[in-house]
Amino acid sequence: MMAVVAARELRDGEVVFVGIGLPNLACNLARRTHAPNLVLIYESGAVGAVPQRLPVSIGDPALVTGSLMVCGMADVFQLLLQNGKIEVGFLGGAQVDRYGNINTTVIGPYERPKVRLPGSGGAAEIAIHARRVLIVSKLSPRGFPERVDFITSPGDRVQRVITDKGVLEPEGPRGELVLTALYPGVEPADVQAGIGWTLRCRPQLVQVDPPTPADLRLLRDVLDPQGFFLKT
Amino acid sequence: MVARFSAGAAGLPFWPLRDYAGTDLPRANPRIKAVACPYTGEALATVPALNPDVTIVHAQRADAQGNTQIWGLLGVQKEAAFASQRVIVVVEDLVEESVIRGDPNRTVIPAMIVDAVVVEPWGAHPSYAQGYYDRDNDFYVAWEAISREPAKLQSYLDEFVYGVTDRAAYLKKHPGLTARLEAKAQIAAGVNYGF
């Protein structure tokens, strides 16, 4: 469901910075359905990638075959990302807070962390330079605290947080995340149960359509037949 | 990291970035500093140059002098090589200089910065070499269990690292590996370099 909702956010022809995992599924689903001209850019240097299999790593050789361009990582970060050529950036994270800030660095204080996370990679740069930032993350009170322990990626450009139960969007001058859309069979209380602050809801909540049979067939039979990413 | 190698490769002390606003990263990393643009006054973040003692690059082919051609994902191999004091290139194929000269745009690392060329087919396994062999994902999955326990790690190292004389012996310990991972052909058309 998350991959399908994320795919629907993408418009045909957009330039998208893609991460491995659910964002990758979402982008390739969009490319095979309503957005055949999506330009997928992977941090490792593949531009306009058309991966014939779901890449299991950001450095997967399947990203190269058939791409429009393959360049070095300095070109990706300097010429494409910092230079403002990326329209959509997809991010996930261990923690997302009330204002869409993301933590992928540490749980607990930085000096004495309880858990050391993978770190920024390019996530800080994507959050700062992509014109629209989409977050894909499963709800849980620990994953959605009032404040993140560490801001790896700022929430300023976040436009949607796509969760496993509904969609959050920033509202007001501070960009507080509010509930705007629910998946079939989900109540606002179910979303609140996975969020560590008192979640505000938009008065008119959008009811998200379930995945189409074609979406499900593509995801399960073509894009991720081994179920690497489709465990939920 | 990319920016730090870029500075190192260009012989500069630091690299400017429009970055880190709104993040906690500069607080956690004191080597991230700031500079005012001398032309516009804009505040820019800076990171210091990174200059490795040795950079080891795996590539598809090089000539005996070290002129190295790479295709597929390039990562920061060019920058890391130029930033480094010494450069070792490991290649799938050693080729004549005429092969390099026949397609000069594909040369990523020139001989002038290369100290040694090691010819070691399948040398990137369990990673891949574009056009030669695929990433061995089964190995990456298995590695998690091996690396979790010191005893398992030690027995792995004893058998597959210290216990082999060369890469050919390593491959012998993995029957069927080359057939399983060998790349399918996807040949690029040549271009006209004439004038």
Image (cartoon, coloured by chain):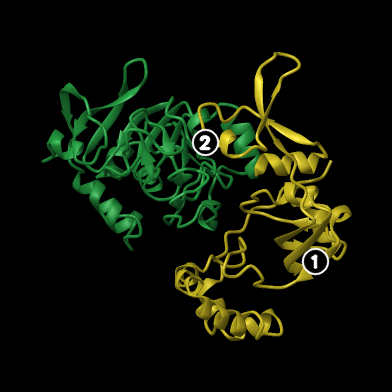
Q: In percent of the image, x 34 and y 45: which residue is there? A: A29
Q: Compared to A25, does B175 lie above or below?
A: below
Rendering coords of residue B49 (x, y %): 75, 41
Circle number at residue A218: none
| Figure quadrant of residue B44 | top right
Mark 1, residues whose alpha carbon is within 10 Å: few (<14), some, or many (≥20)? some
Instruction: Return the residue nearer the eye: A219 or A179.
Output: A179
| Circles 2 and 1 on the same chain | no
Left or right: B35 in relation to B143:
right
Q: Colour of chain A?
A: green
What element does badge 2 sit on? helix
Rendering coords of residue B163 (x, y %): 65, 86
Number of marks in the image? 2
Left or right: A82 in relation to B120:
left
Q: Which chain is yellow?
A: B
Left or right: B34 in relation to A227:
right
Rendering coords of residue A182 (x, y %): 18, 34
Res. B124 visible in picture = yes
Q: In percent of the image, x 42 and y 55: which residue is there? A: A54
- Please name the amino acid that badge 1 sits on: Val
Q: In percent of the image, x 54 and y 66: which residue is there? A: B134
Q: Are marks 2 and 1 in contact (CB under 8 Å)?
A: no
Q: Compared to A47, does B144 lie above or below?
A: below
